[in-house]
Amino acid sequence: MKYLLSCALLLISCNCFAKFDGLYLSSGLAKSSLTLNGAEIDLDNGLFIKAGYPFMLAPEYYLIVELEYNKMGDYEHHYSNGANYDNTEVEASSIGANLKYQSYLFDTEFYLASILGVHQYSLDLMVDTYSQNTLNGKTITTTITGENSINEVGLSYGVELGYSLPYSLNIAASYTMGRIIANGIGIDFITSQVTLSYVF
């Protein structure tokens, strides 16, 4: 127990906090959603990786150039009831560059950053739906079948709150929104990330 307390005190008192003063790599978990034609779809299995480099503007203030690949995740819905069925699959990802303005808060290890990005968004859609409904004695049949792959460039923006840990590590949480226009239809993306960074 004394050993654990000593280690904790050493971490707290250590001055070797990993502020962003060099090349860094980041990864972590992401939770994303997309909105298409007013329908919001929650995506699962999101992962991402980033690499960035900071340029000091003034003490505690940085302009960071960052490259990012974000596997936003996928969505599957399979339903069947008699003759009716619905099979829908969605997969989304993006790759691009971010520009971050980052400042440390009140002489602490906490920092706040604004994010502006340009990304190539990739979206794969597959829909196979069949339904039969009876209305006023008439049977109405609806069939929707198709696949589509969308690749469009869009802007993203967001905010990040983080903390510099000892031994070249940083932890952060971020929230970003992006939008593309495909065939005249707006598609919106929202991503929340929990990030662990290593500063070289």
Image (cartoon, rainbow, N blue to C red):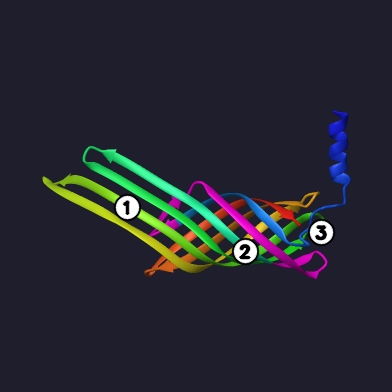
Which residue bears the numbered disc 1? Answer: 127
Tag 3 secondary structure: loop
Lateral position of residue 114 relative to residue 70, left or right: right
Q: Are marks 2 and 3 in contact (CB under 8 Å)?
A: no
Residue type at mark 2 is Leu
| Residue, disc 3 | 106
Where disc 2 sits, the SS reads strand
Report the residue marked by disc 2.
67
Q: Is residue 180 left or right of residue 160?
A: left
First in sequence, mark 2 or 3: give its number.
2
Badge 1 element: strand
Q: Position of residue 17 (x, y in %)?
A: 82, 53
Say whether disc 1 or disc 3 marks the residue closer to the N-terminus. Answer: 3
Q: Identify the residue at image location x=68%, y=56%.
A: 25
Our reading of the magenta stretch's main secondary structure is: strand
Residue at 74%, 58% in the rendered image: 111
Q: Quadrant of the C terminus?
A: bottom right
Q: Residue at x 85, y 52 (%)?
A: 16
Mark 1 or mark 2, which is nearer to you?
2
For this orientation, the residue located farthest to the top is: 1
Q: Which residue lies at the image location 79% right of the left edge and 57% below the top edge?
A: 19
The kind of residue tagged 1 is: Val
